[in-house]
Image (tube, helix red, strand yellow):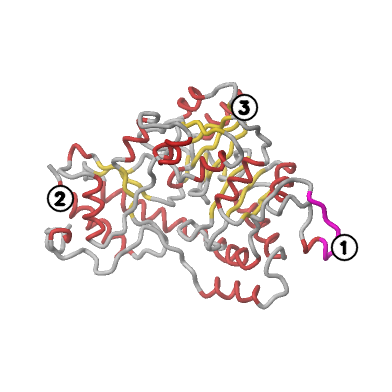
Amino acid sequence: MLTRTAKLALDGGIPVRSTPLPYGKQWIDDADIAAVVDVLRSDWLTTGPKVEEFEATFAAATGARYAVSFSSGTAALHGAVAVLDLNPGDEAITTPLTFCASANCLLYCGVRPAFADVDSDTLLIDPAEIARKITPRTKALVVVDYAGQPAALRQITELAEKHGLAVIEDACHALGATFEGQRVGAISTMTAFSFHPVKHVTTAEGGMITTNDPALAGKLRRFRSHGIGSDHRQREKVGSWFYEMVDLGYNYRLSDLQCALGLSQLAKLDRWLSRRRAIAAAYDTAFSQLPAIRPLSVIPGVEHAYHLYVVQLELNRLRASRAQVFAALRAEGIGVNVHYIPVHLHPYYREHQGTAPGLCPRAEAAYERILSLPMFPLMSDQDVNDVIEAVHKVVAEYSK
């Protein structure tokens, strides 16, 4: 497997790569640039026709009836919680193994996050743990499609229906994924997506909420635009200046420039998903004979979107910690990352929400073992081979 010296770059050996390979990266081509330039030359830079076009195209791509764009995935999550009209002191259950926005969106609205532990093999929120955490104060679930794999949506939906709970699905990792033949975006009460540069498609920064509920869609549109019931273009169409603020909202709008980029990117989604899945398959094969490397399990009935390719280190088979393996792979030119520090372990949550180690032991144990390997469609076959070679090289050095 190794074509170079086995001596680690960390110890003075020759690295697998001379130029670092990031864990994720956007792919911008001439068509994307042309789409943005066209908008720059148009009459509308924001609240214009590209916003509606992007929302309609995105809704069709996910199978949802409505899509409402936002300035970021975090803003989208904030909007989803806000339009449920929850009260201070209400609770919502979410996962600890996610980016902090999945829980912060609850705090923005005065809702207390309750953390339910994850399944050790998939690192998805465990429905049994959700059921255990439900109380009379529980009003919603915020579930995360970690790494691009849909959560156990059938069991989660059944729990939600039994207890009268809304389900906000954080699918910021999972654009293009399916669950039991149904596209992510049309299953839950509301579904949030992100268009950050490392996501499946990018608008630089941006987000979207999809829903099948027209009342929620209307409230989301008002929320992202100061609580006002119309935008400038709508008023221009009818020759009116009059508007009213009917709710308390924010300026969370996505511009026409960004929506034009999103439309151009979305047209390439299927091809990019195929490439992500091919990279994942190559990794699966390459690591199947490495006892110290355990890729996450994929549950039956889903098509994984592979925003991330996460492995768990079997530390009992290694003479190194996750930190040492991380440093060694970085020295080889492989831009590994860690997703994520459990939310309840962040200083803010410990100081202001009273959380502490031991709250979600499976997530905490996984955090000590996980690494995200490079995963993006612009990767060449040689890039993929470099990752595989570096992992084998480091594991060979550190294996017991």
Image spot of residue 74 (x, y percent): 55, 49
Q: Earlier in the sequence, mark 3 or mark 2?
A: 3
Total marks placed: 3
Image spot of residue 287 (x, y percent): 26, 48
**Residue at the image position 65 percent from the left and 60 percent from the top:** 54
What secondary structure do most residues of the magenta stretch adopt? loop
Q: Is residue 13 left or right of residue 36?
A: left
Asked which quadrant contains residue 166, the reply is top right
Q: Earlier in the sequence, mark 3 or mark 1?
A: 3
Query: Residues in magenta?
Result: 235-245
Question: Residues at badges 3 and 2 in contact (C-beta under 8 Å)?
Answer: no
Q: Which residue is mark 3?
A: 161
Magenta region includes residue 238: yes
Q: Which residue is mark 2?
A: 396
Q: Earlier in the sequence, mark 2 or mark 1?
A: 1
Question: Which secondary structure, mark 2?
Answer: helix
The foreground one among 69 and 111 is: 111
**Residue at the image position 15 percent from the left and 47 percent from the top:** 398
Magenta region includes residue 396: no
Query: Tag 1: Cα neighbours inside 10 Å, few (<14), some, or many (≥20)?
Result: few
Query: Tag 3: Cα neighbours inside 10 Å, few (<14), some, or many (≥20)?
Result: few
Question: Which secondary structure, mark 3?
Answer: helix
Q: Which residue is mark 1?
A: 240
Amino acid tagged 2: Ala
Of badges 3 and 1, the one in the foreground is 1
**Residue at the image position 85 percent from the left and 62 percent from the top:** 241
Please determine whether, in this image, residue 46 is positioned above or below residue 152: below
Image spot of residue 149 (x, y percent): 45, 43
Query: Split into 4 quadrants, where in the image is the N terminus?
Result: bottom left
Amino acid tagged 1: Ser
Image spot of residue 247 (x, y percent): 75, 45
